[in-house]
Image (spheres, rainbow, N blue to C red):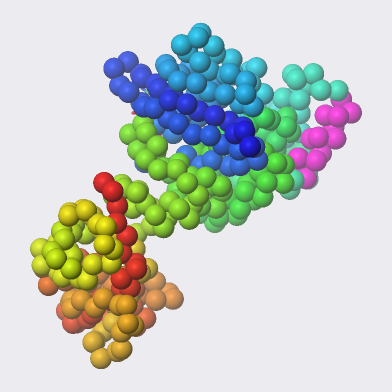
Amino acid sequence: MMSHLSCRNIHKKFGQQTVLEGIDFSLDKGECLVLLGPSGCGKTTLLNILSGAIAADGGELHLDGEALDIPARGIHVPMRQRGFSMVFQDFSLWPHMSVEDNVSYGLRIRGIKRQERIKRVQRVLEQVQMTEFKDRHPATLSGGQQQRVSIARALAVQPRLILLDEPLSALDARLREDLKSEIARLLKDNGLTAVYVTHDQSEAFALGDQVALMYQGRIEQMGSPQEIYRQPRSRFVAGFIGSSNLFEYRRNGTSLILGDEIHVPMPLETLPETGHMVLRRESVRVVPDSSQNAANDEICLPAVCHHSQFLGDRHEVLARLVDDTLVRGFADDLINPGHPVEIRFSMHAMHFVER
Ligand SMILES: Nc1ncnc2c1ncn2[C@@H]1O[C@H](COP(=O)(O)OP(=O)(O)OP(=O)(O)O)[C@@H](O)[C@H]1O
Ligand SMILES: [Mg+2]
């Protein structure tokens, strides 16, 4: 299948500063791509290039085979001709217009007839559950309600592509939780192709068919949420996603030495001589004494509890290994600091990163 949206080797500089460096991805129709990454990594800049608000310096951008941006050939389709919708963190509603007028405005300037406008506005307001507020003005609505209106406005024009820049960041935690799954559902119900910017991992996992983790103007890794989580390719990805323990290792005959002096059996034959190993927090079991039986493939290391905190369903423990390395894991029961423990993990839980 031909990809719907295709981004090839996109570059952007602001003055001397390179902000995007060789961005490459493609996205199929109906898929949602989440751009995830720390502040300043270039997410908004990339979204602005997709929308046409700013022009790329180099590379090629196509949608359905139509060239939108090819600086080398002087091609730049302006924003208003692209037929995209945008949703922003600050809602950006017209303050002097009612909810209904905010939603129908974009349809009017696109020359859509009155009958069709009324039908569409009604449908999208129903979809975001804002029908009863249609005569209100934005200033009289809560943040969550305003964001629903701005999403309705984006859906009403039936865009070829919808671009969302941290739409939930201005809302409180509970509301974010609710709207997150609602947006995911609305995108799918309307068959929309979307690019969604966030620095929140849980939003990325809830919404993304594909997640592109960005760092310093590049895509570090792109894949399904499961791939990004389970098979991080670099230390940056492993550290940004989830909560991981990171070890330097070197090979020594048939074993690996973690840190200075922790010996563990070698899980793979083909490992480089030295490198980094990632161990997810949830793969590490902390037991208060070594009397409990370990599973066959489990590695057991002596340690001392350094700190523990109650999470509700279990305890998170930070334990100190004999070489002073700290390892994070979970325990079923309360363990007090200073108490000797054993940390246990399956050989197969060790994941090796390339860089
Ligand atoms: N118009 C501009 N002129 C100069 N520099 C800019 C401009 N817009 C962005 N930058 C710089 O480009 C880099 C990337 O900015 P961008 O807004 O794309 O980051 P971001 O990933 O969206 O960050 P955040 O999560 O904080 O929103 C930053 O260093 C920023 O200072
Ligand atoms: Mg931004």
Q: Residue at x 50, y 21 (%)?
A: 60
At a point 74% along the width and 19% down the height, the residue shown is 109
Q: Position of residue 168 (x, y in %)?
A: 53, 44
Tell me: 15 left or right of 257: right
Q: Residue at x 73, y 29 (%)?
A: 157
Camera-side residue of 339 and 300: 300
Question: Magenta: predominant secondary structure element?
Answer: helix
Picture coordinates of residue 154, whole percent (x, y)? 67, 33
Q: Position of residue 37 (x, y in %)?
A: 40, 41
Q: Residue furthest bottom?
A: 291
Depicted 276 relative to depicted 7: above or below: below
Q: Confirm whether the magenta stretch covers residue 124.
A: yes
Q: How many marks?
A: 0
Q: Is residue 1 left or right of residue 308?
A: right
In this rendered view, identify the residue nearer to me: 17 or 2: 2
**Residue 314 visible in the displayed image:** yes
Asked which quadrant contains residue 81, the reply is top right
Q: Is residue 157 above or below residue 67?
A: below
Q: Quadrant of the N terminus?
A: top right
Q: Is residue 141 visible?
A: no
Q: What residue span does the magenta drawing correspond to? A: 114-126
Point out residue 142 in the picture as x, y percentages from the top left corner: 61, 44
